[in-house]
Image (spheres, rainbow, N blue to C red):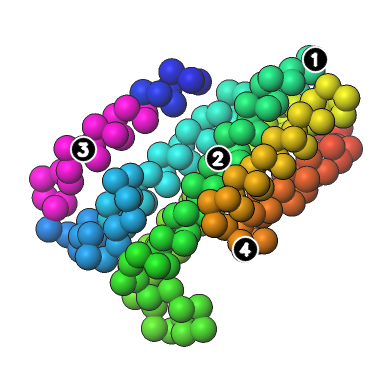
Amino acid sequence: MLSLVLSVAALRWWMLMAGPLPGLEGLPLFDPALFAASALLPSLGDLLVNALLLLVLAATAHHLLGRGPVDQERPREAWGWATVLLALGAWTNGVLIGIVNDSSVDLDLYHVQSFDRYSWLALAGMGTLLGAWTLFAHTGVRRHAATITFRRTGVGLLLLITVHLVVLHLAGVRDTVLMVWPLPPVVLLAALDRRPRMAPG
């Protein structure tokens, strides 16, 4: 799985450095005037490509690694999943803020009737990112929630979350929702995953 992630990341970075493919350069979807936030997100089209690749990676990880709990507690792996989720959540925050602040796309939810196709594509990209994050979260929860003990892993996860909140605060993030939104979905996924399932008839 790690080799797949590294391969996709390397290929995507090469594509970004090479610029838009021939025939796409003149399209408004890949025009930085419409949206450009960073080297990883130079256009709305690149946002959609990145979001779809993340969703494919998340679905692959869920298929390969999320079939059931591990046979014993693995604190380091659990911390690794939590670190990835928090980092991906923080990056997603930046993308959601960027699509509002660094674009000319109309995303005024009070005037949905004025949305154009780029508004809906931007919302689709945002939804795809959140969907990818949710799949990654469910994979980690399914692998580790049943074997985590507070003494070995829980304390470490609480410390990691605390560090995450402090880093966001130092980075200038003051919005409580942006700081803590990854936590309730993980708790909900863990609760849903532990529900008793009916045996097949």
**Count of number-bearing discs:** 4
Cα separation, mark 2 vs mark 4, equals: 17 Å
| Residue 30 left/right relative to 89 | left
Residue lying at the far front of the rendered structure: 170
Cα separation, mark 3 vs mark 4, equals: 33 Å
Q: Which residue is mark 1?
A: 72
Q: Secondary structure at mark 4?
A: loop
Q: Are marks 3 and 2 in contact (CB under 8 Å)?
A: no
Q: In the figure, 44 relative to 9: above or below?
A: below
Q: Residues within 10 Å of mark 2 (few under 14, many from 20)?
A: few
Q: Which residue is mark 2?
A: 87
Q: Which residue is mark 3?
A: 17
The mark that comes first in sequence, 3 or 4, is 3
Q: Which residue is mark 4?
A: 175
The mark that comes first in sequence, 1 or 3, is 3
Percent from the top left, x then y, of residue 29? 25, 60
Cα separation, mark 1 vs mark 2, equals: 25 Å
| Residue 130 left/right relative to 158 | left
The residue under label 2 is which amino acid type?
Answer: Ala
The residue under label 1 is which amino acid type?
Answer: Gln
The residue under label 4 is which amino acid type?
Answer: Asp
**Which tag is nearer the camera, tag 2 or tag 4?**
4
Most frequent secondary structure within the magenta stretch: helix
Q: Residues within 10 Å of mark 4 (few under 14, many from 20)?
A: few
Percent from the top left, x then y, of residue 187? 78, 45
The mark that comes first in sequence, 3 or 2, is 3
The mark that comes first in sequence, 2 or 4, is 2
The magenta-colored residue range is 8-25
Of the 4 image quadrants, the one containing the C terminus is: top right
